[in-house]
Structures are given as structure tokens and as C-alpha cells.
């Protein structure tokens, strides 16, 4: 079984709603869908009022204020991103109205999209310059200017697929504008292999919204499959997707989250013949929607792998790309439990990743395995490997996400736990499950002490 990178997927999940320029941000942790059983083996630039964490659309250069309801916003009165009543970038914010840097491009008053207490403005004309206001916190990652020529790299109506050559592999900042002048739209944005960047956003006719996020582009190698690099893949889907523009820029200095693991965390392609259900995903495919712009994810995980087997087959490429300031997520166990040799060597095999990451100046984070449907705290089902991870984290003082216990606890809160798994499966998450489980992971990391918490929504 393999987890390659090809196309992008279906519309499932919570929606952002923009009506009168009010934007509800973030996927809600909930349930939906259906599933079954399977074998058990397998700120922005700060404005005068900005603070806090980004909205789902990412960081936008300009005035402060979070995405909140209302048509005005917490745009700068004295410091914002526009000159005179216009504002907005040449070097400042994104399309201000009279009160700050509005991001939705429809006639109306200003507003700022950024962390804080403000709201999204309904539009305005682009001014001639502007300077950054005071206040705010968080990484400064601005939106990328839209390049009309890139629209020729996009095709289709639903989904809209964009295949964009880039100069080299690595990290990129991407800005996508969605919406239609003539009709209401609902658009979700995914990147690379079905990695959710923005949950569905609903816009009335004549309303547009920009979203900025970070993407890692690379050549991929999996069992029986390889994908070429230097191509940025985007997909816009939904009940009525509408793409207005996009842009990208190299971001070589931002950190990367490298992921190593098995089929419960890897990228799945719905078109893959070996997949049990086209709705099947690894939880890391949902994690990107919880990242602020300014950090990218490179998912090297592959189906069917043990900690020992993966290290020799796939880890060299990840280790070579790793730099100081990066993170390494490590989750194995589903396949290791099947062999006594892998059980016996589990701790030593995991430590190889930990040691290598530290040697590169990166931060390793170990994960106990994602629990299967029906698991309990008393019977987690991993031949003691989940406890081995806890012991390793404690003895070696390594950061840990106890995903076994977290997922068991979360499953107990969901009325229909089948919705969290692929059809006829008790091991692999569905798209809904990937969104919910990755949200549980993000919440746990955000409550921790690692600097990574400041790059999570």
C-alpha cells in the first residue's frame, strides 16, 4: 500500500461563512459521515489593535484586528497600512477602505484581517503605500501579490485544479483569492495531496476573500511510486467553488514540520486503487488547516511502515532537508506491534529519529499511536508500544503528544464514532476524522511550551 501525491479531493467539513463581511473561522471539532470496521492490523503585520492568533485565512499584511463579525474592523486609526483614505499595499496592507486595510474586495468601508479583535472590512480601493501600525504579536507573514498569469495554470469548474511550476523544491507562501462577482460561492482550498489549507468559505455574489498559507513542495518517494518536484499543486472545491486569483513566493527561511509514520498519518490519494474508501485520510492531511502562514508541513509518512523499516527506506531525504528550527513528528506502532522483533527494537528505532533531529538542530516530537475505533484506556491495543513512547519521552526529556489517550478520549465524545473512520475501517481516519484528530493534536500542542504553539491557530 502506498500514499502518493497526485490529485485533490471532496467537499467535506465545516464552512466559513462570510455575509456582510463577517467570517467565522476554523473547523469545528465535531462528527459526521459514516464508517465501519476494518482489520485491526494494519500577524500578520500588526495594526494598532492587533494581537492574538490568526484567523483561518492566514496572516495578511496591513492593519490589525482578527477575523470577526461585523463590517468595520479594528483597522488602524493612526498607524495602519494606508496613506490618506486609501491605504493598502504598495508596501502595506491589502485593499483598505477608509478605516484600514480591508481584504474583501467589494465596495464598502475598511477593516483589517489579522490577529486581534477587529473585523474584516468590505473593501476599498488600493492606495499608494502605507506603513505598519503599532501593536500586535505573532509572526509577520504577508499576503503574496496575485499574479494574473497564474490563472492559466488552473483548469476545471469543480474542482478547480492548479498545477504551477516553481523554481525549486522548498517552502512557499501562497495567497489565494476566492469569490465570484456574479454568483454566490462556496470554496475550500487544499494544497499538494489533499492537505486542507482553508475549510469551505461561503461568500455572496460580489464578495471576495483572500487566504494566505505556507506549502512545502518536494519530490516524493513512496513504495512503488514517485512524484516529481518543483510543482505547486492547489485545488479549490466545494459546492460552488470560485477562484479569482492566486500568487506565490519562495519562503526559504520559514520552519518546516517533517512527519514520519505509517498509514494513519500519511497522505492518501482518493484515486488510489488500494485504498479502502476514497474518503480515507491520514490525520496529518488535516493538520495543515491549523497552521498559521509561516510554517509548512512535509509529510514523508508511508503506509505499512515500521519505525525500523521506514528509517532505512525514506528518512534520508527528510533528514537531509531538515534544518535548525524545524520540527519532526514521529508516530509509529500500528505495524511494529505485529512482530516481536519490531516490538523489542521499538524504543531504539524511535531514538534514531530523535537523535538525528536533535543533531540537525530540529525539535523531535514523539506520538503514541493513533487509537483504533473501540480501543479503551485499559486495552489500547499496541502491545505496550504506547507506554514505551511515554517512557522514552520521560527518560529522554523529549516532547510528546499522547495521541493514544487523546484519541480514545475524543472518540468517547462522538455519538457516531464510525464517522471518524473510512468505510469498513476501524484504523484509518476519514476526512472528517483527520480534521478532528488533527484538531485534537493542534490543541494539545498549543497548550504546551514549545515555540510551535505560536504558529498554530
Image (spheres, helix red, strand yellow):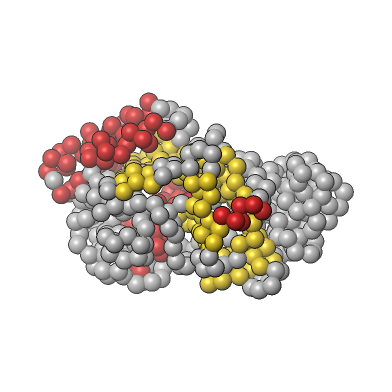
Residue 2 is at least partly visible in this image: yes
- Residue 107 image offset from top left, x and y in percent: 79, 64
Q: In terms of image quadrants, where is residue 218?
A: top left
Q: Residue at x 22, y 65 (%)?
A: 38
Give the position of the N terminus as an image quadrant.
bottom left
Q: Residue furthest left?
A: 340
Q: Residue at x 20, y 46 (%)?
A: 336
Q: Of residues 237 and 73, which is closer to you in this image? A: 237
- Residue 11 image offset from top left, x and y in percent: 47, 67
Left or right, 293 with reference to 86: left
Q: In terms of image quadrants, where is residue 229?
A: top left
Q: Of residues 286 and 233, which is closer to you in this image? A: 233
Left or right, 36 with reference to 189: left
User: Vertically, is 45 above or below 193?
Assistant: above
Q: Of residues 379 and 310, which is closer to you in this image? A: 310
- Residue 101 image offset from top left, x and y in percent: 75, 52
Q: Residue at x 60, y 42 (%)?
A: 249
- Residue 77 image offset from top left, x and y in percent: 82, 49
Amino acid at each position: 500500500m502506498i500514499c502518493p501525491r497526485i490529485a485533490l479531493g471532496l467537499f467535506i467539513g465545516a464552512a466559513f461563512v462570510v455575509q456582510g463581511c463577517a467570517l467565522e473561522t476554523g473547523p469545528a471539532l465535531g462528527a459526521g459521515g459514516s464508517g465501519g470496521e476494518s482489520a485491526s492490523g494494519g500577524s500578520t503585520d500588526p495594526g494598532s489593535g492587533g494581537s492574538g492568533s490568526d484567523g483561518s485565512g492566514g496572516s495578511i499584511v496591513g492593519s490589525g484586528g482578527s477575523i470577526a463579525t461585523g463590517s468595520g474592523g479594528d483597522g488602524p486609526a493612526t498607524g495602519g497600512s494606508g496613506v490618506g483614505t486609501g491605504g493598502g499595499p504598495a508596501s502595506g496592507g491589502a485593499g483598505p477602505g477608509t478605516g484600514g486595510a480591508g481584504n474583501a474586495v467589494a465596495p464598502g468601508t475598511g477593516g483589517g484581517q489579522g490577529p486581534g479583535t477587529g473585523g474584516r472590512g468590505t473593501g476599498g480601493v488600493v492606495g499608494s503605500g502605507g506603513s505598519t501600525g503599532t501593536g500586535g504579536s505573532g509572526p509577520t507573514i504577508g499576503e503574496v501579490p496575485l499574479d494574473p498569469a497564474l490563472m492559466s495554470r488552473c483548469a476545471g469548474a469543480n474542482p478547480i485544479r492548479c498545477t504551477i511550476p516553481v523554481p525549486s523544491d522548498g517552502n512557499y507562501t501562497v495567497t489565494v483569492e476566492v469569490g465570484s462577482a456574479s454568483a454566490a460561492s462556496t470554496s475550500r482550498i487544499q494544497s499538494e495531496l489533499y492537505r486542507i489549507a482553508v475549510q469551505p468559505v461561503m461568500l455572496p455574489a460580489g464578495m471576495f476573500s483572500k487566504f494566505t498559507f505556507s506549502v512545502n513542495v518536494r519530490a516524493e518517494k513512496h513504495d512503488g511510486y514517485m512524484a516529481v518536484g518543483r510543482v505547486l499543486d492547489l485545488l479549490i472545491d466545494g459546492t460552488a467553488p470560485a477562484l479569482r486569483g492566486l500568487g506565490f513566493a519562495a519562503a526559504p527561511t520559514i520552519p518546516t514540520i517533517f512527519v514520519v509514520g505509517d498509514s494513519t498519518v500519511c497522505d492518501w490519494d482518493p484515486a488510489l486503487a488500494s485504498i479502502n474508501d476514497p474518503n480515507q485520510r491520514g490525520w496529518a492531511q488535516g493538520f495543515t488547516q491549523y497552521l498559521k502562514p509561516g510554517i509548512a508541513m512535509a509529510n514523508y509518512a508511508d503506509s505499512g511502515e515500521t519505525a525500523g523499516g521506514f528509517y532505512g527506506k525514506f528518512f534520508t531525504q527528510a533528514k537531509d532537508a531538515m534544518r535548525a528550527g524545524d520540527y519532526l513528528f514521529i508516530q509509529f506502532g500500528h505495524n511494529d506491534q505485529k512482530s516481536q522483533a519490531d516490538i523489542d527494537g521499538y524504543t531504539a528505532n524511535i531514538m534514531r529519529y530523535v537523535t538525528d533531529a536533535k543533531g540537525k538542530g530540529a525539535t523531535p516530537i514523539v506520538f503514541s499511536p493513533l487509537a483504533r475505533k473501540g480501543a479503551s484506556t485499559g486495552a489500547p491495543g499496541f502491545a505496550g508500544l504506547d507506554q514505551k513512547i511515554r517512557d522514552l519521552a520521560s527518560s529522554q526529556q523529549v516532547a510528546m503528544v499522547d495521541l493514544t489517550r487523546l484519541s480514545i478520549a475524543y472518540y468517547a465524545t462522538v455519538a457516531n464514532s464510525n464517522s471518524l473512520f473510512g468505510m469498513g475501517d476501524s484504523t484509518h481516519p476519514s476526512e472528517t476524522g483527520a480534521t478532528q484528530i488533527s484538531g485534537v493534536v493542534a490543541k494539545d500542542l498549543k497548550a504546551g511550551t514549545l515555540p510551535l504553539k505560536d504558529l498554530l491557530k
